[in-house]
Amino acid sequence: MDYETPQFFRVMQYAAGADRDVVDMVSGNPDWEPPEALREGLRDYADGDVSEFQYPPSVGLAELRTEIAERRGVDRSRVIVTNGAGEANHLATTGALEREGGGSELIMTDPVYPYYAGRANLLDADATYVPVDETGQLDPADVRAAASDETAAIVVNSPNNPTGAVYPPETVEALVAVAEDHDAVLVADEVYDHYDFTGAFESALAADSDHVVATNSFSKTLAVTGLRVGYAVFPPEDGPLGDLVERARTRHMIQNVTGSRPAQAAVLRALRETPPEYYERNRERLRERIDRFTDALDRAGAEYTTPGGSFYVMARFDGFPGTMENVERLIDEAGVAGMPGEAFGESRGDWIRFALVTPRVDEAAERLADYLG
């Protein structure tokens, strides 16, 4: 897969220029409210002392890193607060590729979140794609068959975008074993961990391996994609891959100097004060949307995925493959914007991905059923 130009923006720009009303099912921006504690944190911050408006520590506010470390069961020294999960993944991937004798290959899934593939192109890395099965599950045996001494990192995402698959603990443990056997890094993007509908999700950190970097952010969890607060948990400094965290600290400082202090302070407030009911309420919202949307896809005669996690549904319509041209037709003629399956790789080229983060899910579903049914 050759991914040079982000297709998300191309679709969104096309939809914005349409001469009709269009339901946006492209972007992963939650449409629900962030926790009230987060808003309170921002308001209180605005009224704070001027000293709080200055540079925070480059690696992130100590209190926030401590909160993250306690929740993840790791030492705080392993945590770096980043500019969203995107930077966290970049630091982990570049670190893996820059290790002495670490290899030049990245193993990813097909379909793949396109920014992983774009990063491989940007870094001039060798990219190997391992297809998932029809339910979106990844077979570790296929990853093992693809891995070699040239493998620098295995990049996975669970709960998954775009398939909605949640990898069970035994899959994650087997992937960790492949990384260990080839002295590679398992980069586990867990940004949708709060949107697991199966109860099967388990962080890769549970493997307690020196070969795991777990990345995450609060963009989806707290419905604040614009605040750009993410993090990475690196292997311990006293372990065999201990240089990864120091390399990441340096690169992060050179690239960003530091992150947003008010955003970090607001996230910290939200983590401390938001009750579990907030997260369950949003999961239930998505469960209901998935049911309603897939019911409409049934009426349209479509084949579709039922996500075990995240908030995406992929659908395949007979005689209407997931090309960019057909996505543009859907925008112009049905008033629904989705992402072409071909943007995620070869194995789902006939599919279209829809993000269920809009209050207009029912309306979009009816439009699709009317147009393609």
Image (tube, rainbow, N blue to C red):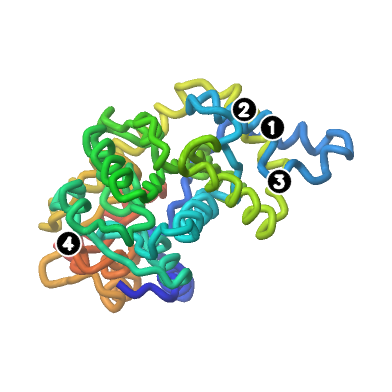
Identity, as a three-letter code, of the amino acid under mark 2: Thr
Residue position for label 1: 62
Mark 4 vs mark 3, CA separation in Å: 45 Å
Task: Give the labeled residue for mark 2.
Answer: 66
Amino acid type of the residue tagged 3 in the rendering: Ser
Question: Residue 233, image x and y in percent?
Answer: 51, 39
Q: Is residue 286 left or right of residue 275?
A: left
- Give the distance between the C-alpha atoms of the residues marked 2 and 4, in whole angstroms: 45 Å
- Identify the residue position indicated by label 3 in the image: 58
Disc assigned to residue 19: none
Q: SS of the residue at dot 3?
A: loop
The location of residue 282, given as percent across then percent down, is 41, 33
* Inter-mark Cα distance, 3 to 1: 10 Å
Question: For the residue carrying disc 4, how many other residues have a C-alpha within 10 Å: few (<14), some (14-19), or many (20+)?
Answer: many
Which residue does the numbered mark 4 point to in the structure image?
Answer: 316
Q: Earlier in the sequence, mark 3 or mark 2?
A: 3
Q: Residue type at mark 1?
A: Ala
x and y, in percent, of residue 373 in the image: 14, 62
Residues at circles 1 and 2 in contact by the CB criterion of under 8 Å: yes
Q: Nearer the viewer, mark 2 or mark 4?
A: 2
